[in-house]
Amino acid sequence: MSITALDVPTLERLVAASVTAPSIHNTQPWRFRLDPDTVTLEIRAAVRRGLRHTDPSGRALHVSVGCALFNLRVAVAHHGWEPVSRLLPRPGEPDLLATLQLSGTSRLSATPRLYEALWRRHSSRFPFTGRPVPVSVLTELTEAAHAEGSMLEFPGVAETDRLLGLAREGERRNTADADRSAESRRWVHPPNDGSLGMPPAVAGPQDFRDRIPMRDFTARPHPSELLARTFEKRPFIAVLSTLHDRRTDWLRVGEALERVLLLATAHGVRASLLHQALEWPDLREQLVDSRRKSAQMVLRLGYGPQGPSSPRRTARQVLTQDVRPDAVSGVLVVG
């Protein structure tokens, strides 16, 4: 496929694929710009959509953008090009987190499976069945994380209990902290109000047996009918970590996270993200048993209902320039 075939519908399809990525509180903290001279897409941080209290360092924002970058890589390869990405390419522009140039012919062989999965992937905060994930699938997920420079580990029973305890403590602190609690509530919106963020149905129920610390976005008592929700007796979790803890590592682990999530989706495995302990430095340090590693995400994996999906901004809402097709050639004209 020729680079000049990048018309407006294709560009918007690429960006729409990218923004199906997960982001903390569904903040979608990204914006895109096309450089038509080099056919390069820039992904910049939408700083106003960051979480000042929950994510003061911007680590979670970078992880979210890394997820979007991986989706963009998959979509570009699916459309026949080789995606050439760079992280933090211009030190003088700290909001420019990544660029991706469309070049040559794609060599990403796993694209069809992952591309189809990115349209179906979303977090499921509902109870899982407790059915174990096959070892063969776990091996594939581990290899997927490794391919993106990260480590995915599956703790045993005792370690799982300890990690879930840290997540529960993180959630308790978040609920008790007035600023963080208010910040969470600002991202919860009633259905059909035209707002983005976390509709109440997406936020999911709480585990009233206190085994799994599902995030309480409302910080208010839940209806009594939710008491009937039965979560799995033995949650199965994974920890995603890196050897370093720099901005580039945050972006790369986002790419690893999304690769793992898409592959899990392709295998019919559901996932939710237990991020609470990562939001408190002292708790985050305890998530891994080695000072040589930095914990970046805790995942809950299993089989269960797909649940509703969070709304996404459209491609035109996140593209920062007026892009229109030339009336004669059909290629992009950027104003």
Image (spheres, helix red, strand yellow):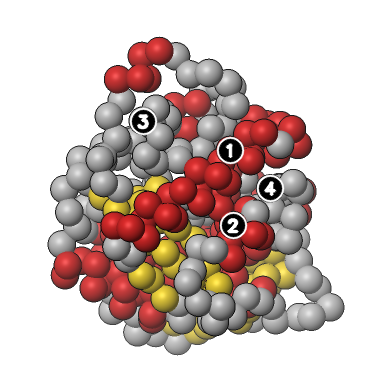
Label 3 secondary element: loop
Query: 123 or 320, which lies in front?
Result: 123
Which residue bears the numbered disc 4? 54
Q: Are marks 1 and 3 in contact (CB under 8 Å)?
A: no
Q: Mark 3 or mark 1, which is nearer the start of the sequence?
A: 1
Which residue bears the numbered disc 2? 283
- Looking at the rendered structure, the kind of residue marked 3 is Arg
- Residue at position x 36%, y 14% from top? 225
Residue 92 appears anywhere in the view: yes
Classify the position of the N terminus by image quarter: bottom left
Query: How far apart are the two marked residues, 4 and 3, measured between alpha carbons?
Result: 26 Å
Q: Mark 2 or mark 3, which is nearer the start of the sequence?
A: 3
Which residue bears the numbered disc 3? 209
Q: Mark 1 or mark 2, which is nearer the start of the sequence?
A: 1
Query: Can you tell which of label 4 and label 3 is closer to the viewer?
Result: 3
Label 1 secondary element: helix
